[in-house]
Amino acid sequence: MSQPITLKDHEKDAQLVRRRVFVGVAIVLAMVGVLIARMYYLQVVQYEHHSTLSENNRVHVQPIPPNRGLIFDRDGRIIADNRPSFSLTVTRERAGDWRQTLDTVVEVLQLTPEDRELFEKRVLQGRRPFEPVPIMYELSEEQIARIAVDQFRLPGIEVAAQLVRHYPQGEHFAHSVGYVGRINEQELKQLDSVNYSGTHHIGKTGVEKFYEDVLHGRVGYEEVETNARGRVLRVLKRTDPIPGKDLTLTLDLDLQEAAEAALGGRRGAVVALQPATGEVLAMVSQPSFNPNLFVTGISFKAYGELRDSIDRPLFNRVLRGLYPPGSTIKPMMAVAGLDTGVITETSKVFDPGFFQLPNVKHKYRNWNRGGDGWVDLELAIARSNDTYFYDMAHKMGIDRMHDYMTRFGIGQRVSLDMFEETAGLMPSRDWKRARYRQAWYPGETVILGIGQGYMQTTPLQLAQATALMATKGKWIRPHLARHFEGELPVDPQPLPDIELRNPRYWDAAINGMEQVMHGSRGTARKVGESSLYRIAGKSGTAQVVAIKQGERYDSDALNERHRDHALFVAFAPVDNPQIAVAVMVENGESGSGVAAPMAKMVMDAWLLDEHGQLKAEYAPQLSAEASNP
């Protein structure tokens, strides 16, 4: 029996189709609604946000680094300037695979693997987003042409013209002016990130570092429109940077060269000050180095040669060299002895060639083993008699000695704007107890009276102590900056003047210094004989290695670098001091024979005119009675 045939329900099929169409239309309308809502949200609700993002993709703010201030000597001669240079920069965000790009640069310019390693090191240093990083300086015309030809292979690489620091005087002012160098990561963390945008160099040493804020200036900026590849299409807005202030120093180029010539290539230091103002007229540390090597990055080999040299050209002997002052300290000790009442101008000591503490067998030798007989203060300074100062130091004691020498600047930083200066050492009971856990011994006081023992000074401190003798105690800190565009340096912590019970004590010590140069028994009388002006000076010798009791100093038996240092301090003219000089010659042995002629050469260069005559403005000042007889 066959099954019945079911007839098709057309009405039911039509309803199903209509329902499906309705659902489909609803879904489509819902999706369209979502799209419209999303478009409304993006284009209306978040218009400002996306407008800014779009603008940022097209418009960039680029920093404009300020021109660094120039540095001049006191007569306006350029010491540090900025010269144009073409450098190669890379922007990592625009370079894609920047390591591959660096490989291509090395290939195009035919450089070494060492250059490639240096490039990557510079790129990886701390930087700001989208900031071009210089990887190579001083491009030649051929190198610029090679980059231009292969520019399509070098995304993110550009040749940029910029000003680079240059020191036209070379080695002359390397230790005083210092140099600039590339900003390292540690410095970048401490700097104002906004003001140093686009700046890649900062003062590293000397004046360049101390006056960084003055020399750097304020950053500018410009808004630029770029294409998709980052190339600048046009400048939309520009705010010019404020250049750094020009700095005029107290240093004199001619006197600096004269001081270097006086040293004659020997290891040592020369400092010349103007006593009345504290201005540093010359500051020489020899040997020196070329600061231009450090500006764009010194090679490892070149730096190693400087660093490892036995002569230490990078070492600033003026500010960081510590030496026993030797007999150069005796005039200051004399002032202390007079003011404490330990001695008078006429006090005499008998010198048999040595000094002994009571009930002690040890003999503290005078440099003149035969002795000078009865010696007063003036002769003691003129002859540099050790026995006189041994006796005075013993009577004065370490406590009073420490107090007075500290007032002369010994054992403390004396400069206003030389941050590298070492404080030196003026020992005391408390210092020795803290350092060695020992009591202070009388014998240590004795040798301290002639500038030996624990006492350590810098050539700058000796020059300042000498300037204080010239001004009779008026304290003005030595400084290198004369003015920066009219602004004068200010001492935030001026030191008190040295005031004595009787001003004539200054004259007594100065008379002794004058006899050193012009007295019949003065240790440097041969130098003073040829002088056209009166000089107050004092020689000194600082031991490098100790000599045993009873032994004599034998120069020939010692290695050259173990021989005594030669020192000399002086100011002139005596009646109208215009210059104070300190000279230290490493292993020079004789203060009066080696260092004294050097000091006179420096003073002659400052005080004499082109005809070899004393300049009129430096002649001794006559009193009103003398000028109107």
Image (cartoon, rainbow, N blue to C red):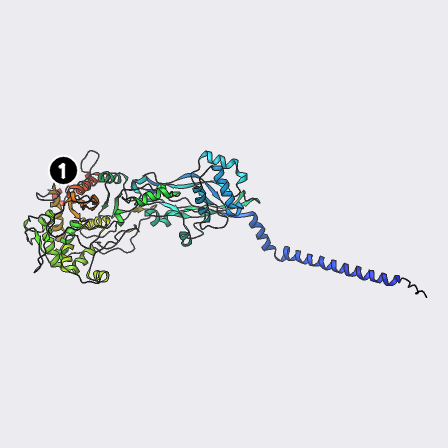
Which corner quadrant of the image does residue 578 belong to?
top left
* Picture coordinates of residue 601, whole percent (x, y): 20, 39
Q: Amino acid at mark 1?
A: Ser
Drawn side of residue 65 relative to residue 80, left or right: right
Residue where numbered disc 1 is placed: 530
Q: Residue at x 77, y 61 (%)?
A: 23
Q: Badge 1, how many Cα within 10 Å: few under 14, some, many 20+? A: few
* Most foreground residue, 458 or 607: 458
Drawn side of residue 232 relative to residue 468, left or right: right
* Picture coordinates of residue 323, whole percent (x, y): 21, 50
The quadrant of the rendering that contains the N terminus is: bottom right
Could you tell me which secondary element the residue under label 1 belongs to?
A: loop
Q: Residue at x 49, y 35 (%)?
A: 146
* Most foreground residue, 628 or 354: 354
* Picture coordinates of residue 62, whole percent (x, y): 49, 47
| Residue farthest right in this picture | 1
Regarding residue 585, the answer to whether it shows in the image is: no
* Picture coordinates of residue 203, whole percent (x, y): 36, 47
Q: Is residue 346 above or below residue 430?
A: above
Q: How many numbered tags mark residues here?
A: 1
Drawn side of residue 611 relative to residue 134, left or right: left
Q: Is residue 499 above or below residue 66?
A: below
